[in-house]
Image: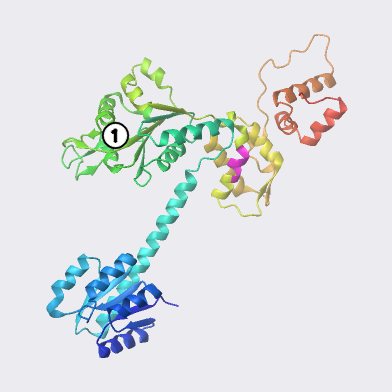
Amino acid sequence: MPEPILLIDDDASLRRVVEFTLDEAGYQVATAINGEDGLRLFRQMRPSLVITDVQMPGISGYQVLEEILRIAPQTLVIIVTAFSTVEQAVGAMKSGAYDYLTKPFSRDHLLLTVAKAVEYRGLKQENVRLKDALEEKAQQGGQVVGRSVQMTRLMERVERVAASEASVLITGESGTGKEVIARALHRKSSRQQGPFVAVNCAAIPKDLIESELFGHLKGSFTGALKDRQGKFPQASSGTLFLDEIGELPIDLQPKLLRALQEQVVEPVGGSPESIDVRVVAATNRDLEQAMNAGQFREDLYYRLAVVPMELPALRERPDDIPDLIEHFLHKHQASAEVTIDAAVVDQLKVYSWPGNVRELENVIEQMLILRQGDCIGLSDLPPRLGRSTPAVCGVLNLPEEGYSLETLEREAVEQALVHCQGNKTKAAAFLRIPRHTLLYRLEKYDIRSPS
């Protein structure tokens, strides 16, 4: 059923004609004989489109427009006016009216104007829906997952730092989620309504990075065919995330330092302009080593690292892996019927994860695509995760006279339990055997878990 259109007009004849025309075209129409009656109906119905005459006794169409937009600013209002007051109708459009009709108007003109308004309303609603969907996706992609001690402490630090304007330098291995933390800092800050602009310094050609960050004017260099706004101005009133900051060319670092210190940038070929930006940077490089090698300025480092944050590698927080698995299953829209066998989770918890959280997400997505059933088992694991970690050369040093295999097996079980603090599930995964096999060995050798 279409949303109703509210028609307000004191001319009974015109009102009947417009109502009949719109009703015949399939619209649902409610009518009011004056401004007071129209506003009363509007408060009851909250229609998305209102057609109102300008010249009415009591409250004029302009006052009706003003009150409707105060109550519901998203409402579309079409003004009906005489030819002699077109200039006033144009003024009403500047005040928020969608369009106007000049008396006398034809049936086709009326229907075309209303159809355009309805189409515009639909496009606005679709735009809002898409923006909400993008925001939801951004929130999902930027969600910090993990309840381990390391992540709890890190998020407590994020909460404290977010309220400040201090520059933050996030360090950690590739794939640990540095941009996720940067987005969390932005969402929890007073700048959350402003833009979050991310720049990967390693992905921009060296001769273009200055223009990318600070912008340029038309004709300032070969190929500058028009003015370009840089990432710093784009992030005005928000947060600029400089990923892979360790890859920034040394000759551009002084200009970045000035932008941080003075909140001023200078486009290529242009004049200095003020900015209002908070900078969060990230790197997986050892910047102290880069400073010693003369590849990174010391003053820039300390300006960026007012508050340093280090992200732990995934192998250092295996207890977060079950939560991350659930998060990625939801993110990749796995159906409710899809489950993951506990043995798979155990195997994922003992893998070293050189690619960190990013690698884990790729593995979950791969298993979802290639799974043989709704329950993901050990056979669905990528080969590299199903194999044992290569033994370190010399891990066994057997005596010349030989050694009992049973004794060797008992020692392996005992050491695995000590390594896993007595957790039998972790010990079984560590030894790459099913949990029931470990329990059998514990009973066979009368082994007690360490306290």
Task: Report how many numbered discs are placed on residues in the image.
Answer: 1
Could you tell me residue 136's position as x and y percent?
46, 52
What kind of secondary structure does the magenta stretch mostly adopt?
helix
Could you tell me residue 69's position as x and y percent?
30, 67
Residue at x-position 42% and y-position 43%: 187
Residue at x-position 36% and y-position 82%: 30
Residue occupied by mark 1: 209
Could you tell me residue 378's position as x and y percent?
69, 41
As drawn, which residue projects farthest toward the top?
A: 400
Give the side of residue 448 with respect to residue 177, left or right: right
327 vs 255: above or below: below
Q: 105 or 370: which is nearer to us?
A: 105
* Residue 228 appears in the picture as rendered: yes
Query: In what quadrant of the picture does the C terminus appear?
Result: top right
Residue 314 sits in quarter: top right
Could you tell me residue 132's position as x and y percent?
43, 56
Query: In what quadrant of the picture does the N terminus appear?
Result: bottom left
139 vs 383: above or below: below
Q: 98 or 400: which is nearer to us?
A: 98
* Residue 98 appears in the picture as rendered: no
Residue 162 lies in magenta, yes or no? no
Q: Give, as a single range, the part of the protein colored magenta.
A: 321-326
271 vs 87: above or below: above
Residue 322 lies in magenta, yes or no? yes
Residue 24 sits in quarter: bottom left
Q: 45 or 368: which is nearer to us?
A: 45
Residue at x-position 67% and y-position 32%: 387
As drawn, which residue projects farthest toward the front?
A: 58
